[in-house]
Image (cartoon, rainbow, N blue to C red):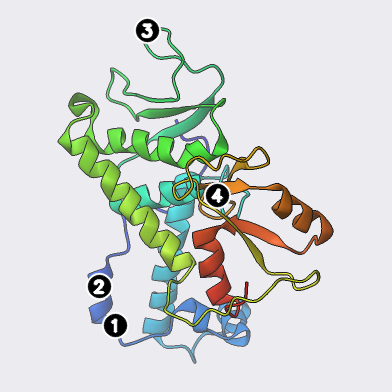
Amino acid sequence: MREYTTLTREAVDVVEGAAQYMSETAPMEHWSDKMLDLLLNGPTINGIKKDEVRALLRQTYAALKRYEVIGPMASPFMNDPTAIVALAFRELYPRLEYYAQYVPGLKDEEGKPACGLTIFPDDGSTPIVCISAEVPISAGPELLAHELAHVAAGEAVEHGPEWKAAEEAIFQKYNEILDAKIPDEPVEVTVTPHEVGDGGILAMPLKANIPDPQRDDWKLVACPICGAECWENDLARQAMAAEPELRAACTTCALKAGVTTGGKH
């Protein structure tokens, strides 16, 4: 059913333990542009150690395989939480395949509207994960994780302990990946009054912390980094309108991002 050509092989993965047979090497991100260009385009690679070339190939193959699982329809968004869910599932269950699609007017077997469901074909072929095209973007990651837990646990278990364990594992891995993207290191954070021109990140209160704000101007939105539900108010909208460089995120992501950009909010 896959309609695009892949370079990696389903039965071949990069085995972490195999690195013990090689001397210590630097990952690709530590290579200089000059060395990488020499390897790719130079007349010879005699000056480069065999283990360095092998390590580079292993790192490239592993990264390419993760991409090829998603294929040419990979998300164009740099902060797509559903893509992080898909990556979390792939790292946990590298041998399991599925197809995912948005379906307008999605309905279950009884003809009732559904937010998400997973189809297990009778012939045992690849499961198909369906997410309603009508649900809010902020609900996408949780729905995808829910359905991928069905793919991991199998059709027979429905919402039993195996399914619950798979869902929790996916969410835990999701948070690990997200934390790696936004390091959570103990750094002193300086909070100062914001003035137009300062830039930075505007923190929006999380719905989990303030479930019912009792204010008409508070609008429920999705954090553009993690997808969590948070509140945007008139003051925030006015600030962003007056200052195009100002960004907004949920309180948690704003604090983490502030740490990585100098700790000023």
Residue at numbered disc 2: 18
Disc 1, disc 3: CB below 8 Å?
no
Q: Nearer the viewer, mark 1 or mark 3?
A: 3
Disc 2, disc 3: CB below 8 Å?
no
Q: Nearer the viewer, mark 1 or mark 4?
A: 4
Q: Which badge, 4 or 3, comes first in the chain's sequence?
A: 4
Type of amino acid under label 2: Ala
Which image quarter is the N terminus in?
top left
Residue 75 seen by the camera: no
Q: Nearer the viewer, residue 42 or 155?
A: 155
On the image, the x and y values in percent for residue 186 come to 42, 79
| CA separation in Å, label 1 and label 4 | 36 Å
Q: Nearer the viewer, mark 2 or mark 3?
A: 3
Disc 2, disc 1: CB below 8 Å?
yes
Relative to 41, does residue 61 appear above or below in the rendering?
above
Query: Residue at image x 70%, y 54%?
Result: 236
On the image, the x and y values in percent for residue 83 come to 49, 48
Query: Residue at image x 63%, y 49%?
Result: 76
Relative to 30, does residue 124 appear above or below in the rendering?
above
On the image, the x and y values in percent for residue 80 come to 55, 49
Q: Which badge, 1 or 4, comes first in the chain's sequence?
A: 1
Residue at numbered disc 3: 110
Residue at numbered disc 4: 80
Q: How many marks?
A: 4
Q: Which badge, 1 or 3, comes first in the chain's sequence?
A: 1
Residue at numbered disc 1: 22
On residue 163, which mark appears? none
Type of amino acid under label 3: Glu
Query: Residue at image x 45%, y 71%?
Result: 183
| CA separation in Å, label 2 and label 3 | 51 Å
